[in-house]
């Protein structure tokens, strides 16, 4: 069942998200010795990562992955890796060998193929051995309901269940070329945490919690393992009776 938490403002949402991420990483380390977490870019989680850098008692047993990336150089201002480096990887002094970067500069096809190999080689497999199972994936949501770089109605939403990472060449948001974890990998994760703040996200959050549809990719996440944290501005209205 989806857990929805609404708090007063964006700062409080970031604090709650940082605490939830730290708790999930501790639980994973306690249970399996190492935690595997995938992070998203964008403006929404920036403050969360700044807080997370000081929330956890060390990252020596944490492997950092990415939910998606723009096909730009890692130093580019559009790079998710650069944002995460500035806010978390650098301040927390996370060892480079613990960070699995999507190589956006390789382009969508080659970058996705390289990342799929990295997942197969370094991420833990589920009991059936079919898909890697990350402990936590941190996601945002676009006003159109997209998550990672999985956009409404896109063919990537219908990718084979065995696909781990996908190239995107026609993103409706610039830049058009991207790399993204597949929906199958998002759904296989032990937990997804979705953070949304601001009134522009309220309709998307409401649609996400309604019936699953390819028109709202976030609605296709595994709801029984989904935690949603919103501020009051992004909180969907309570149903009327």
Image: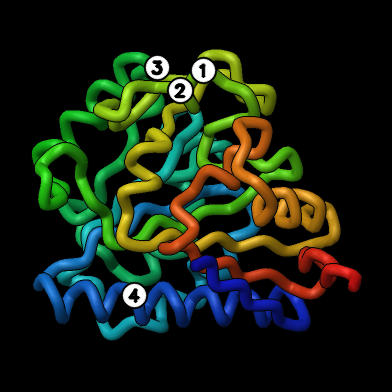
Q: Nearer the viewer, mark 1 or mark 3?
A: 1
The residue sitting at 77% across, 68% down in the picture is 235
The residue to which callout 1 is attached is: 155
| Pointer 1 with pointer 3, Cβ within 8 A | no
Instruction: Categorize mark 1 by other alpha carbons within 10 Å: few (<14), some (14-19), many (20+).
Output: few
* Residue in the picture at 51% in, 17% down: 155
Q: Are marks 2 and 1 in contact (CB under 8 Å)?
A: yes
Give the residue at mark 3. Answer: 107
Q: Is residue 45 above or below residue 203?
A: below
**SS at mark 2 in the image:** helix
Between label 3 and label 4, give the one nearer the viewer.
Answer: 4
Mark 2 vs mark 3, CA separation in Å? 21 Å
In this rendering, the answer to whether 44 lies above or below 28 is above
Q: CA distance from mark 4 to mark 2?
A: 29 Å
Locate residue 162: give its quadrant.
top left
- In the depicted view, which residue is nearer to us: 51 or 220? 220
**Cα separation between marks 4 and 1:** 32 Å
Disc 4 designates what residue? 24
Query: With 38 as the anchor, is 174 left or right in this view?
Result: right
Front-lying residue, 119 or 207: 207
Q: Earlier in the sequence, mark 1 or mark 3?
A: 3
Image location of residue 54, percent across then percent down: 41, 81
Callout 4–callout 1 Cβ contact below 8 Å = no
Q: Residue at x 61, y 72 (%)?
A: 4
Residue 50: image x %, image y %?
51, 71
């Amino acid at each position: 069942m989806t857990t929805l938490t609404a708090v007063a403002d964006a700062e409080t949402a970031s604090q709650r998200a940082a605490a939830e991420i730290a708790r999930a990483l501790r639980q994973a380390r306690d249970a399996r010795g190492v935690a595997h977490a995938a992070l998203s870019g964008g403006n929404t989680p920036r403050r969360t990562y700044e807080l997370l850098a000081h929330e956890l008692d060390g990252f020596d047993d944490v492997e950092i992955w990415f939910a998606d990336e723009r096909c730009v150089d890692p130093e580019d201002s559009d790079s998710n890796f650069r944002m995460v480096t500035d806010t978390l990887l650098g301040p927390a002094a996370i060892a480079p060998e613990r960070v699995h970067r999507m190589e956006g500069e390789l382009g969508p096809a080659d970058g996705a193929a390289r990342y799929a190999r990295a997942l197969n080689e370094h991420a833990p497999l589920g009991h059936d051995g079919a898909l890697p199972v990350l402990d936590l994936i941190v996601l945002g949501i676009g006003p159109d309901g997209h998550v990672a770089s999985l956009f409404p109605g896109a063919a990537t939403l219908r990718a084979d269940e065995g696909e781990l990472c996908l190239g995107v060449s026609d993103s409706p948001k610039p830049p058009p070329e991207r790399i993204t974890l597949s929906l199958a990998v998002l759904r296989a994760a032990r937990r997804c945490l979705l953070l949304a703040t601001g009134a522009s996200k309220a309709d998307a959050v409401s649609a996400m919690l309604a019936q699953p549809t390819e028109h709202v990719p976030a609605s296709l996440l595994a709801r029984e393992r989904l935690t949603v944290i919103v501020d009051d501005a992004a909180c969907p209205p309570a149903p009327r009776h």
